[in-house]
Image: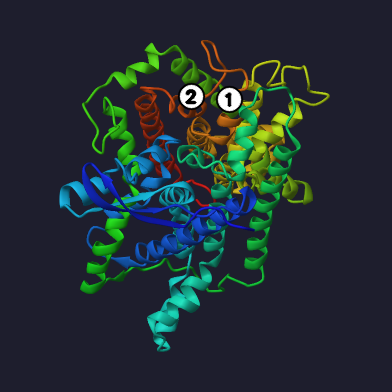
Amino acid sequence: MNPIGSLLEVKNVVFGGRNITIVVLKGVSFGSIINSFVVATISTLITTAIGIAIALILPLYDFPGKSILRNLAIVPLFAAPFASGYVVKKFFDWRYGLLSYVINDVIGIPLRIGFESFAGVILSEVLSLYVIVYLNVSAAINSIDYTLIEQALNLGSSFRKILRDIIIHLSMPGIAAGASLTFILSIEDIANPIIFKEDRLIAYEIFRSFQDPTTGSRSPGAIFMTILIILISLGVFIGIRRYVSYKRYAAITRGFKPLKPLKLSRKGIALVYLFILPFLLFASIPQIGVFILAFSTRWYEPLPEGFTLKNFAAFVDDKIVFTAIRNSIVYSLTALAIIAFMSILIAYSSARIKGSLSYFLDTLATIPIAVPGIAIASGFFLLFTSPPFRGTLFDPVLFSPGTAITIAYTVRRLPFMVRAVYAGIQQVAVELEEAALNLGASRFKAFTSAVLPLMALHILGGTLVAFVYCLSETSVGVILGGLKGVSVGHAAPITFIMQDYLETLYGTQIVGALGAILIILQVIATVTSSAILRGYVVIGVR
């Protein structure tokens, strides 16, 4: 319990021939276990506060430029593993970061600001994860019956009291879902600790154990860390759900009345454009920076240098990168076929066949949301390197890790597809299926003829989202991807190559190009599925 390091480092140094003051936010270390809990907790608190604040503005009020701010708010949803983290680190590096360059070299203030170690990890996580809280809380607010607000106003209630007792109270399930998912994603985050070279976190400890020469077994410490991260994540997930279940959030009304946005005053509009808009632009820096990195010849100084398309040519010219892209597509398509089949079965049984078995299947399909990907990857490694799987095609050490990666992709992304397919089945009238059964059709015939064609768009929407998230899966790719090494004909996916290429001379620009392609694919998938399903299909919210 004796902390190592300092939270804030302030000192006067000579840099570039001038006397300047540097302010570097770092963080103290209490050991990997406590560090991970502290980093995840701080990230969750900050992202929850930001997500709630933005969600209380955009859905509740109507003002000029609202659609632009709504689009900006979801930009962090499009992740580029490692590339976006590199941009954040580059922007806030006190030596050659863009922020310090503007403050010190452009404005002329003898001050340079930096984020390193735990502070850098937290900053990067906040910029990428607040959107999860925002989307969940926005969905909860949009589901509130506006009749309740009208009744409160008619009874003389102030808007502050309405905000506290109705809006925030009825949005608590969305707040809890967003907070719990943010905590889980933060504690399992492996990309940002690698970027900021912070190895005193549980996720990095597990990752480092897989960097050692593979012998088919893991150290007891790595196994303990894996179990611990599962217990912490499930404990938080179950604890928040139990807390939410203690209160009732449903409203009994004669008819649902959609939320009616309120007019925002001039003072409110000024506050939005002075605070909300700058933050949303600031939170978009990682995604914007990824494209700058992708098209630059090099980016070592504060500003990128040159413009080139050669980074994208590496997709074909570089055999290792080309193989990684091919591997990811093969793994993702194979996982997608299994996901589609399983999702249809699980969603149909949950919607049409009521009983304990269908509930159990639906619960099993949803649980992977609460289990960190790094734990799933480690678990499959331990399973397939132990009897009776040791020495079989499933063994990622003696054979290719592709089988284990595909199965892990399937488990990780199954919940996305199940929710989309379930929504589609709910919109198909059960009377159509009953009519087919009454006319002598078998249940299989009734399903394939009457139900499946009507939910095809939902299947397509869920498939697009699941495919893109399989391509960008980080934890599984980093843990299992390099078990057979990286050479021509390797079995690693895109995300492992992105992590591996960060250490090479010109690999950073290639990582940026790969990140740009992943962002473009995510945008296409999200826009298409949003048009199909009339809403975003993301973690925890539709």
Q: In the image, what residue occupies the spot 36% across and 32% down? A: 516
Label ID, residue 426: none
Q: Mark 1 falls on what kind of element? A: loop
* Occupied quadrant, residue 400: top right
**x and y, in percent, of residue 358 in the image:** 73, 46
Decide: few, some or many residues near mark 1? Use Cα within 10 Å; few <14, some 14-19, many ≥20: many
**In the rendered image of this protein, does residue 153 appear above or below residue 457?**
below
**In the rendered image of this protein, does residue 474 appear above or below residue 488?**
below
**In the rendered image of this protein, does residue 506 appear above or below residue 252?**
above
Residue holding disc 2: 497
Q: Can residue 414 be seen in this view?
A: no
**x and y, in percent, of residue 177 in the image:** 56, 58
Q: What residue type is labelled 2?
A: Ile
**Disc 1, disc 2: CB below 8 Å?**
yes
**Depth check, front residue: 494 or 88:** 88
Decide: few, some or many residues near mark 2? Use Cα within 10 Å; few <14, some 14-19, many ≥20: many
Badge 1 or badge 2: first in the primary sequence: 1
Residue holding disc 1: 481
